[in-house]
Structure formats: structure tokens, C-alpha cells
Image (cartoon, rainbow, N blue to C red):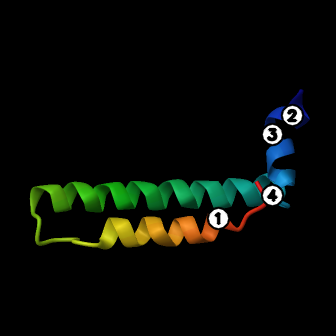
């Protein structure tokens, strides 16, 4: 049960639990940053015009070649 909950997925992308924790945690922080940039852009359209979309494109490129 422990392995299924905490280890199976990280192993499927060739990472340890802690490597996956750092990768996914960093990804989450970047998503929050992209969301904040999009929110500021919604309020003041001349600011952060392409920031959120550029961040998301880079995150997609980084994750699209992972095995799972």
C-alpha cells in the first residue's frame, strides 16, 4: 500500500520519491506564478502580456518527454 501511494508513480518517471517531490513542488510553484501573472494581466492588460503562456509552454516542454 505504501509503495503504491508514494513510490509507484515516481519510479514510473525514473525518479526517487524526493526527486519527484522537488520536481512536482517546483512545478506547482511555477503554476502559481503563472496564475498570478495571468491575474495581474487580467487587471492591467499591458502587464505580463505573454508571461503566463510562455511559462506554461516551457513547463509543457519539460514534462511532455517524461515517461508517464
Side of 21 relative to 43 (left or right): right
Label 1 or label 2, whichever comes before in sequence order:
2
Mark 4 or mark 1: which is in front?
A: 1
Label 4 or label 3, whichever comes before in sequence order:
3
Which residue matches tag 3? 6
Picture layout, residue 16 above or below residue 45: above
Mark 4 or mark 3: which is in front?
A: 4
Which residue matches tag 4? 13
Mark 4 or mark 2: which is in front?
A: 4
Residue 64, numbered label: 1
Percent from the top left, x then y, of residue 35? 34, 55
Q: CA distance from mark 1 to mark 2?
A: 23 Å
Q: CA distance from mark 4 to mark 3?
A: 13 Å
Instruction: Name the element at disc 2.
Output: helix
Instruction: Name the element at disc 4.
Output: loop
Label 1 or label 3, whichever comes before in sequence order:
3
Label 4 or label 2, whichever comes before in sequence order:
2
- Alpha-carbon neighbours of circle 2 within 10 Å: few (<14), some, or many (≥20)? few
Q: CA distance from mark 4 to mark 1?
A: 12 Å
Side of 42 relative to 53 (left or right): left
Report the residue at 87% width, 31% height from top: 2
Amino acid at each position: 500500500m505504501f509503495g503504491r501511494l508514494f513510490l509507484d508513480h515516481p519510479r514510473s518517471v525514473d525518479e526517487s520519491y524526493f526527486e519527484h517531490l522537488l520536481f512536482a513542488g517546483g512545478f506547482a510553484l511555477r503554476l502559481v506564478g503563472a496564475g498570478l501573472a495571468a491575474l495581474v494581466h487580467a487587471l492591467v492588460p499591458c502587464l505580463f502580456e505573454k508571461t503566463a503562456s510562455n511559462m506554461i509552454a516551457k513547463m509543457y516542454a519539460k514534462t511532455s518527454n517524461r515517461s508517464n
